[in-house]
Amino acid sequence: MEEYSIYFERYGYFSLFFVVALLVPAGMLFASFLFKIIGIRKNNPTPVKTDIYEAGIRTFSSRWSGFNFRYYTFAMMFLIFDVEVIFLFPWAASLIKLNDAYGLIVLIEMFVFIGVLILGWFLAWRQKAMEWI
């Protein structure tokens, strides 16, 4: 019977977190609405505030300016390869413990992992995604 109490206790923690995660944003929205009704939060829209940038800076043209997509691609590749490097640290830290039982298997798996990373880097380099401009 005790294993059931631990099981339902974990669902209780999850349910409590879920309720708090719903009530906090809803409470903030309700408080903002209430402050607007009371008069603490003013609502004074002006043409400058409702402009595209909301900072008072007028736009230079009416059309949307182009954005060089290579900057986004370069940033995403950096993020992907940076996150993949994070996976190397736990492997290196636990290699001594894993060396006794699964040393060769873990080493082969990590070489496959690094090989996939190198293959992805080579394909990105070949498609000229690494060039800045």
Image: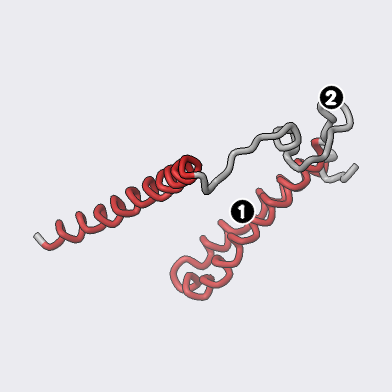
Q: Is residue 60 above or below residue 102?
A: above
Q: Nearer the viewer, residue 126 or 60?
A: 60
Is 33 situated left or right of 88 in this image? left
Residue type beneath disc 2: Ser
Considering every residue shown, the one lying at the far top of the view is 63
SS for dot 2: loop
Residue type beneath disc 1: Phe
Exactly how many numbered labels are in the figure?
A: 2
- Residue at x 55%, y 67% (from the top left corner): 90
Q: Nearer the viewer, residue 83 or 118?
A: 83
Q: Is residue 64 above or below residue 79?
A: above
Q: Which residue is mark 2?
A: 62
SS for dot 1: helix
- Residue at x 88%, y 27% (from the top left corner): 61
- Residue at x 52%, y 75% (from the top left corner): 96
Q: Which residue is mark 1?
A: 113
Tell me where residue 115 appears, x and y as whole percent: 67, 52
Query: Which quarter of the rendered picture does the N terminus lie within?
Result: bottom left
Is 81 situated left or right of 27 in this image? right
Occupied quadrant, residue 46: top right
Tell me where residue 29 appears, x and y as whole percent: 46, 43
Residue 33's tag is: none
Is 55 situated left or right of 7 in this image? right
Query: Which quarter of the rendered picture does the C terminus lie within?
Result: top right
Instruction: Select label 1 or label 2 by which is in front.
Output: 2
Considering every residue shown, the one lying at the far left of the view is 1
Tell me where residue 114 appears, x and y as whole percent: 66, 55
Occupied quadrant, residue 26: top left
Q: Earlier in the sequence, mark 1 or mark 2?
A: 2
Q: Residues within 10 Å of mark 2 (few under 14, many from 20)?
A: few
Tell me where residue 25 appears, x and y as whole percent: 44, 46
